[in-house]
Image (cartoon, rainbow, N blue to C red):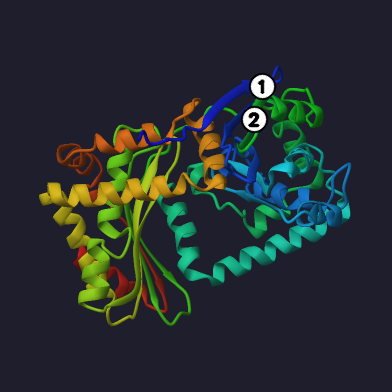
Amino acid sequence: MTAFVFQPEFRKTVLPNGVRVVTEHHPFSRATSAAVYVDLGTRDEPQGLNGAAHFVEHLVFKGTKKRSAFEIAKSLEAVGGELNAYTSRENTCFHAVSLREHLPLSLEVLVDLATQATFAPSEFTKEREVIEQEIDMSADLLEEYIFDLYFEKAYAGHSLGLPILGTSQTLKGITRDKLFDFYEGHYGGSNLVVSVAGDVDHQRVLDMVEKSLSPTRARYPRQPRQAPKVGPFRSVVHRPSEQIHLLMGLPSGSYVGTHRFEAYIVNALLGGGMTSRLYQKVREEEALVYSIYSYLNTFTDAGLIMVYAGTSEKNAPKVLDHIAEEVERLRREGLNSEELEFFKTQVKGTILLGADDIENRMNSIAVNEMIFGRYRSVDEVVAEIDQVSVDSVKAYIKTFFKPEDFGVMVMGDIDEKTANRWISSAL
């Protein structure tokens, strides 16, 4: 008996005004996931408007030409769906999940948010205060806040180092007129990618989008990005805290770099899960931490691989030593073929399981469009992972794992002299 293998159908159309519409047909899915991506994020904000993209993300939910704030909230919830948005350093996304019969509603609301918001002056003032509270709240979440401060140091002088939320100071400099011009000029045309996955017909999606979307082009197409230089640093941040928060990192490859999947494998090996070297050594064997993990952050033209740990003041020097030792061990020995196959299987399993999630597929086809300008199937990605070898991992490590490039941040109730002594001892 021949096994049936389902292959989703991908289609893409570029509308006359530059809007890209991508779909992936999954005939057995009851749910549909749709999004309007704006192909610009914090790094693309004009000078003096840091925090603008995130501010827009908040304000569009406060009212459009067709809907009040309550009507926006009610629209998808009334049919059991979900509506949300997020802002990153490289894009902004308005997304929805609904039953397939409610896809027209999802797309209409998403286009409404992305292109027809009104920015009422009273809502502008109130939402700025809400975001200022969000900034204060994020500064209290030290395990997350340390990453923002790390980016600021690692990408010093580059827009990738700017905070997604902006700062209280930059928000005060953003007027309603400046923000509305940013929204009207950027949120349209070639800056938009409409992505849909589920039991959908591509032509029908096109008809829905063209019915809802303005035919005008973007007044401000996204400008070409300048690649950053990642600089080494040592930083101690004093904050009242029961724990010491540690973050150590090195440059890594970009989305389009030669060693993208080698970076995935090394991240999984270093601290990507409970089977990783650092988790087993630092938590399981020596019980020095509750939380330790590595994190791979990848952009269109840059990347970072970072290791976070939260620990006591007593254990902090040992944890820093262990992280540095594992990185040095990777530099010296690489990994063996057995480890490689283990972590390749792990990474492929994560990707294949994710391929069964309709929202994940919607995100994937949109991101591939924005970064590569083309469709990359799950099978193609898995085939690329299969090509990773012991030698190619060694080449990745040789390229990026240089001790002189280490960025190190220590945050907590600790004096600078003591923390710098820990860092110097580890490195």
Q: Residue at point 25% right, 43% down?
A: 400
Residue in front for this viewpoint, 196 or 223 = 196
Q: Residues within 10 Å of mark 2 (few under 14, many from 20)?
A: many
Screen quadrant of the N terminus? top left
Task: Describe residue 191's horizontal placement relative to residue 320 as left or right.
Answer: right
Residue designated by label 2: 191
Task: Describe residue 329's horizontal placement relative to residue 298 as left or right.
Answer: left
- Identity of the residue furthest to the top in this view: 16
- Amino acid at circle 2: Asn
Q: Position of residue 397 (x, y in %)?
A: 21, 44
Which dot marks residue 10?
none
Q: Is residue 45 visible?
A: yes
- Amino acid at circle 1: Gly
Screen quadrant of the C terminus? bottom left
Do callouts 1 and 2 mark residues in contact (Cβ within 8 Å)?
yes
Instruction: Indicate which disc, 1 or 2, sits on the residue closer to the N terminus.
Output: 1
Q: Residue at point 47% right, 28% down?
A: 372
Residue designated by label 1: 18
Secondary structure category for the residue under label 1: loop
Q: Position of residue 360 (x, y in %)?
A: 52, 46
The answer to which image quadrant residue 139 occupies is bottom right
The answer to which image quadrant residue 395 occupies is top left
Residue in front for this viewpoint, 326 or 248 = 326
Q: Position of residue 28 (x, y in %)?
A: 57, 41
Whether 181 is drawn above or below 17: the answer is below
Q: Is residue 90 visible?
A: no
Q: Residues within 10 Å of mark 1 (few under 14, many from 20)?
A: some
